[in-house]
Amino acid sequence: MRRALQRLRALFGREPAGGPWRATDPELPAASAGAPVASASGLSRWRLERELARGSMGTVWLARHPDDGRPVAIKTVPLGPPGGDDAARARFRREAAAAQRLEHPDIVRVYEVGETDRLAWIAMELVQGHDLSRYTEPARRLPLPLVLHIGERVARALQHAHGRGVVHRDVKPANVLVDIGAGRVKVTDFGTAHLSDAERSRSGLVLGSPSYMAPEQLAGRAPDARADVYALGATLYHLIAGRLPHEADSLARLLAAIAHEPVPDLRSLRPDVPEALADVIALALQKRPETRYASAAELADDLRAVQALLDTAAAGPAHADVAGRDIGHEGATSAGNDADPRHNAGRR
């Protein structure tokens, strides 16, 4: 914690003066015309309290809202020097501003965004729970009806964003937060993908999260809503099968597999998966975007239809107790007993 605060102080040039540390008012670069970036005093209004988590692309802090003191999360992402990638900065401003306009119960709310010459930051809703990464492990797999329910809600959240011209570009388990006990599902990190891409480009790494990325996105084409559909399909595949659609021992082989090799049929890994569900996931993971679901809404509708099939085919009380129930009902999954109070902090 001490070293983390020292790094943040170095960015803003001020020592704490007792109590929760506040950032000073850094000088902001000129914003592009029409880009509603927060003012220079924006970040200093939010009382930073402690670091929640740190990932490869930034740090998440617990802070307090300046108006009513409620807890919020502030994600800070280091920027390259001004002028190093002005196009990426401009895209970040546009996408972050668009993310502020998204109002959906299953999307993490963005309160404010801003940047300095060395740091971008996003103040957003603080969400309790876990990201879906923990449930990709074979020993922690969620029941199929629950996976379908989560997938449908994520798909409808994505459709809301797509309808407003916002493509997530980095859908993956780490960017979906769930609180099983509270029945909460939240998609997060809208508006940061372009910024992450720029940072990864400078360090020579592939853009985004390649294991979940659509082939056309890996090939450098501008992603549209169908790329998010592919990424959600890969996420659901991982949750159901306990492994990724494509796995390889090197990045080069992974990219080649995503581009050219067929995805193993889900039923070859989990014989209990209904044929209808395997077909839905296979359609979401089509190599060519024109043969994929045309929208996230179509994927959501088919996931709901498969849920209905599972309900109809339920053969016993144990299955009926789970099928068709909303996320978070007691007994739906052993994960509901987890006590770890993680928030929207541990994303990569």
Image (cartoon, rainbow, N blue to C red):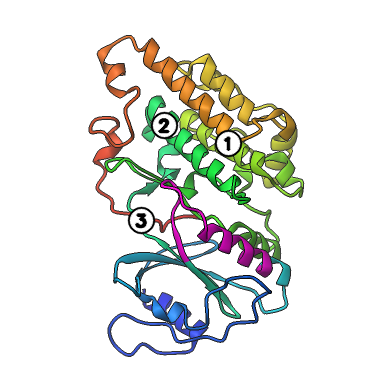
Q: Disc number at residue 40?
A: none
- The answer to which of marks 2 and 1 sits earlier in the sequence is 2
Determine whether, in the image, residue 222 is placed left or right of residue 342: right
Query: Which SS class for mark 3?
Result: loop
x and y, in percent, of residue 177 in the image: 41, 47
Residue 109 lies in the magenta stretch: yes
Query: Which SS class for mark 2?
Result: helix
User: For the residue carrying disc 2, how many other residues have a C-alpha within 10 Å: few (<14), some (14-19), or many (20+)?
Assistant: many
User: For the residue carrying disc 3, how many other residues have a C-alpha within 10 Å: few (<14), some (14-19), or many (20+)?
Assistant: many
**Magenta part of the chain:** 89-111
- The answer to which of marks 3 and 2 sits earlier in the sequence is 2
Check disc 2 and report the residue beneath it: 149
Q: Tell me where residue 83 sits by quadrant.
A: bottom right
Q: Is residue 252 visible?
A: no
**Vertical position of residue 170 compared to residue 254: above or below:** below
- Amino acid carrying label 3: it is His
Q: Tell me where residue 126 sits by quadrant.
A: bottom left
Determine whether, in the image, residue 163 is placed left or right of residue 144: right
Closest to the camera, between mark 2 and mark 1, is 1
Q: What residue is shown at x 64% (from left), y 60% (from top)?
A: 194
User: For the residue carrying disc 1, how many other residues have a C-alpha within 10 Å: few (<14), some (14-19), or many (20+)?
Assistant: many
- Amino acid carrying label 1: it is Ala
**Vertical position of residue 207 compared to residue 267: above or below:** below
Check disc 3 and report the residue beneath it: 343
**Vertical position of residue 156 compared to residue 169: above or below:** above
Q: Tell me where residue 294 sits by quadrant.
A: top right
x and y, in percent, of residue 165 in the image: 63, 50
Check disc 1 and report the residue beneath it: 296
